[in-house]
Image (cartoon, rainbow, N blue to C red):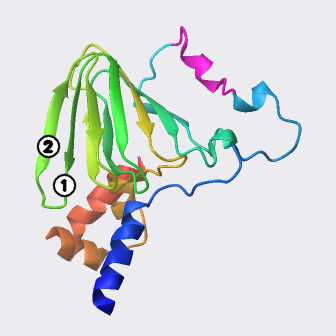
Amino acid sequence: MILNLAFMFAIFRIAIAGDPNILPDFMARNNTIDANYFTFTEMRQLVGGEYPTTFKALKVTMNEFPTLNGQSVSYVILEFPAGSINPLHIHPRASELMFLVSGSLQVGFVDTSNNLYQQSLQIGDIFVFPKGLVHFQYNNDTKEPALAISAFGSANAGTQLIPTSVFNTSIFEGILDVSFRATRATIRKIEEGLKQ
């Protein structure tokens, strides 16, 4: 009986996981609120702007736009110059819903059973990356850029880049050697490549 109750409680906690609900309509830091509080203007730089020379993510999370705190939503504009990649990464606190605005992308994720789900996206396609799963986006077109917009079900989905998290920390090299079945020289070469 106690085991059943514990199991039901665990399932209930999982079912309601996400950003905490707030009691007021919004989380204001002071009492002088007007429409400017709800307006984010930093994306204006995209209008008429040039594509960057490397992959660029313009985030709109509660860190950049505090009004999002408690609203369970955030946004990112993903700019992919020709041949660029958004490296392997995860979002620990939210799923990602990506809409391809221009260009084409090769995208994919790996589930917890180690199955790869990948797709070639064209303009107008939408793809879902489930919460917490390793995924990537790659513009394999060598001439044309791509632009995508992603929405998240959290005011701060978090992004953890896998290469940086694994090879650009102080994890003991012996652990990396064994984990990747690689020589110490190979691990050091990867680490040096990430520092450039």
The correct choice, above or below, for 175 with respect to 116 in the image is: below
Cα–Cα span, label 2 and label 1: 8 Å
Q: Closest to the observer: 174 or 21?
A: 21
Compare marks 2 and 1 and give the one earlier in the sequence. 1
Q: Closest to the observer: 116 or 181?
A: 116
**Is residue 41 one of those drawn in magenta?**
yes
Q: Name the residue tied to disc 2.
A: 117
Residue occupying the point 64% across, 53% down: 22
Q: Name the residue tied to disc 1.
A: 111
Indicate the amino acid at tag 2.
Tyr
Residue occupying the point 28% across, 56% down: 190
- Could you say which disc has been placed on residue 43 in the image? none
Magenta segment: 39-49
**Is residue 119 one of those drawn in magenta?**
no
Indicate the amino acid at tag 1.
Asp
Q: How many labels does the image show?
A: 2
Query: Residue most toward the top?
Result: 48
Query: Residue most toward the bottom?
Result: 2
Give the side of residue 146 with respect to residue 61, left or right.
Answer: left
Horizontal and vertical percent for residue 184?
23, 71
Residue 86 in view here: yes
Secondary element under disc 2, as helix, strand or loop, is strand
Give the side of residue 184 with respect to residue 69, left or right.
Answer: left
Q: Label 1: few (<14), some or many (≥20) within 10 Å?
A: some
Give the side of residue 2 with respect to residue 62, left or right.
Answer: left
Please tell me in which quadrant of the rendered image residue 189 appears: bottom left
The correct choice, above or below, for 149 with respect to 116 in the image is: above
Contact? badges 2 and 1 (CB < 8 Å)? yes
